[in-house]
Image (cartoon, rainbow, N blue to C red):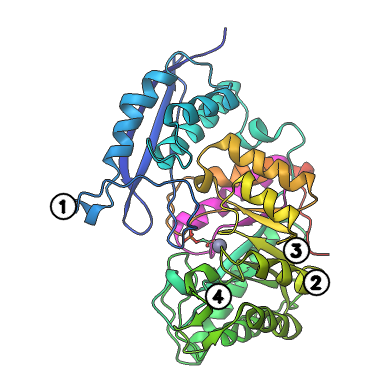
Amino acid sequence: MKQRISSVDAMEIFDSRGQPTVRVWISLDDGTHATASVPSGASTGENEALELRDGDKKRFGGKGVLKAVAHLRETIAPALIGLDPSRQAEIDALLIDLDGTQGKSKLGANAILGASMAVARVAAKAAKVPLYAYLGGPSAARLPVPMMNVINGGKHADNSLDFQEFMLVPHGASSFREAMRYGAETYQALKGVLKKRGLATGVGDEGGFAPSLSGNEAACELIVEAIETAGFKPGTQVAIALDPAASSFAVKDGYELAKSKGGHKTSEQMTALYKKWIGAYPIVSIEDGLAENDWAGFTRHTKALGERIQVVGDDLYVTNVEFVRRGIAEHATNAVLIKLNQIGTVTETIRTIELCRAAGWRYVVSHRSGETEDTFISDFAVAMGGGQIKTGAPCRSERVAKYNRLLEIEYALGKAAIYASPFV
Ligand code: PGA
Ligand code: ZN
């Protein structure tokens, strides 16, 4: 006999920035239960599904999530009780209908995603298989190459860097465990390089260092030095990925590098700058090099760079099939960043990934800058098999929890585990 959902509950918890977020519990009638916690972005795309905040200035400056919690208890719970949790697509469709708005603004994408993730997790438990196997099937065995954000700027740190993320990509390792060693040793070497130069070693929102440097380019130089100091070969063993998150420094007629005092740039000048950097540094991937509304710029950008590197759209697509479809038609990028909370259900996220696969595009499963100890995305990345995850520096437990879960999955898979570079 199939187990049924017997209760859905929710509460307000805290994320890694100390801001409120949503946690959901689901129990089945046989006592099986699971929880899920929802992350939160800072450099959010304007077309993301709505993260419902209370707006009551007396609590958390308006950032409380008690309304989302109430929607879970009063509207979502009665609709889910009695359902078979293995009917994920049906349940997600029901949640979308219950909300009834385009951007999940009635119940809140944070409420809906919490329920959707908890349903998947409790169904996996009921089926007595790990979440990655439940979502990915018996062949799910590919560990993702981690993109480790080791220098933080933009909206994630109060420093002189306009670009948000400078990441290590230990794609030349022989296993996920070895890749973690490459990344963690390079991270420690980077700390030494910063100290030697008298630069700050405090960390930003995603656990990367947040020094004030002479300009964005200096971050790439320091990373190359750290890779070499740690004894690895830049490019072949440990490469670099960037997420400038350019929507966050876009102005009406281009881009303003205000934090680094780098002046104004047109869309074409930004692409020319990246082209120069690709020649000088071992960069394999650039995400949101341009802003979310610069569609024509993205087509030029991908034409100029897409043969040599992975061009990823994050704010541009917000994990939404409608925007990804447009991107494919316009050759706007050749890869997509995947964030469950940008779209708001597990099923819709999987549909976006299916579209990427059909187009021969790559996809990178990603955390948010505001995270919790929830490791759903680790299992999800293995289940989806895309071979890439972005989940911060090897520092701060909300980031490391995801990496530790991936280490567990690799261990559990044993000889079946696959670690392969997408960049060869
Ligand atoms: P966010 O940043 O979670 O603050 O949006 C992550 C990203 O831009 O990839
Ligand atoms: Zn991004």
C-alpha separation, residue under disc 1 versus residue under disc 4: 41 Å
Residue 381, above or below 234: above
Q: How crowded is mark 3: few (under 14 residues within 10 Å), some or many (20 or more)?
A: many
Q: Going by the image, does 421 lie left or right of 343?
A: right
C-alpha separation, residue under disc 1 versus residue under disc 2: 51 Å
Q: Residue beneath label 2, please? A: 308
Which label's residue is closer to the chain start, 1 or 4? 1
Residue 381 badge: none
C-alpha separation, residue under disc 3 versus residue under disc 1: 50 Å
Q: Is mark 2 on a helix, strand or loop?
A: loop
Residue type of the residue flagged with mark 1: Lys
Q: How crowded is mark 1: few (under 14 residues within 10 Å), some or many (20 or more)?
A: few
Which label's residue is closer to the chain start, 2 or 4? 4
In magenta stretch: residue 394:
yes
> Which residues fall within the magenta stretch?
386-413
Q: Residue beneath label 1, please? A: 58
Residue extending farthest top: 1
Residue type of the residue flagged with mark 4: Gln
Residue type of the residue flagged with mark 3: Ala
Residue 359, above or below 192: above
Which label's residue is closer to the chain start, 2 or 3? 3
Residue 188 badge: 4
Residue 173 badge: 3
How many numbered circles are shown? 4
Residue type of the residue flagged with mark 2: Arg
Q: Main secondary structure of the magenta part?
A: helix
Mark 2 or 4, closer to the camera? 2
Q: Is mark 4 on a helix, strand or loop?
A: helix
Residue 355, how many percent across, how many down? Answer: 72, 43
Image quadrant in which the C terminus is located? bottom right
Task: Say whether marks 3 and 1 touch (CB < 8 Å).
Answer: no
